[in-house]
Image (cartoon, rainbow, N blue to C red):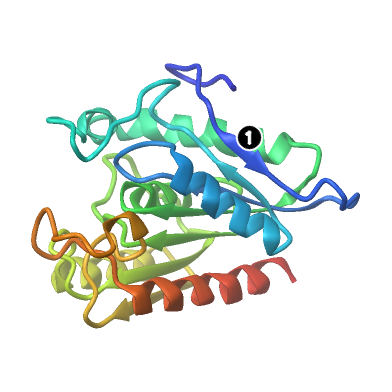
Amino acid sequence: MYDGPGGPFEGVIVYDDEVEAARPGVLVVPNVLGQKEADNQKAEALARLGYVGFACDVFGQGKRTTRADDDSARYMNTLNADRALLRDRLASSLAVLADFHAVDPAKTAAIGFCFGGKCVLDMARAGMDVRGVVSFHGVYDRPDYPSVTPIRAKVLVCHGWDDPIDPPESVVALGQELTGSGADWQIHAYGGAGHAFTDVELEGKPPHRPGVAYEEKADRRSWLAMKDFLIELFV
């Protein structure tokens, strides 16, 4: 449980308590459904890599949805309409991670999935104190407040080329934006993959909309790209 604007919030921190030295911390920002077991599992995977993983919460305690809900995007839509509030909630989550006793506060990063991918890009745009961010099948529209220049956080974007939410022109626009902001950026595009390509809960299920499905190769390749990216950040 932690505080922040509109809180309280509830997240899960995972780390190896047998390691005494402080280590890098990686924020995990969830998708449209909010903080859930799948995000905890990502934090656990990061802990196995030697980091402190924090599956954070930007919606608020108890504010979660499922795909079966009639309005599964209601909490996300509230924050899409108030990107400054979203920014401030992300900053609160990052502060919790940086203050955690097992974390070296000079070595933090953030990864996010779908809506969470938008969130971590906003963290970089806002100049938050992270070494880098990784967006997995994120959403690329810019916030309604100015971005910092230069963007100091390194940026890795893992994108499904057939993503209907982010067609090729939006990917080009993101690259142009990041270039204009002086960012050190990479975009990895995966053929045959659309939106939500890391979401194993969708594996074997018919897409609830075209272009939204799990894709094993893109999932595996993007995680490997993230691992290399984090190593580069924290050497």
Instruction: Say if 149 sits above or below 192 in the image.
Output: above
The residue at the far left in this view is 210
Instruction: Say if 40 sits above or below 9 in the image.
Output: below
Residue at the spot of label 1: 95
* Residue at x 81%, y 37% (from the top left corner): 101
Q: Nearer the viewer, residue 129 or 180?
A: 129
Residue 54, image x, y percentages? 60, 43
The residue at the far right in this view is 20
Q: Residues within 10 Å of mark 1 (few under 14, many from 20)?
A: some
- Locate the C terminus and report the quarter of the image it occupies: bottom right
Instruction: Say if 94 sits above or below 92 in the image.
Output: below
Residue 98 appears left or right of 148: right
Residue 179, image x, y percentages? 37, 71
Residue 199 visible? The answer is: no
Q: Amino acid at mark 1?
A: Ala
Q: Quadrant of residue 209?
A: bottom left
Residue 137 appears left or right of 125: left
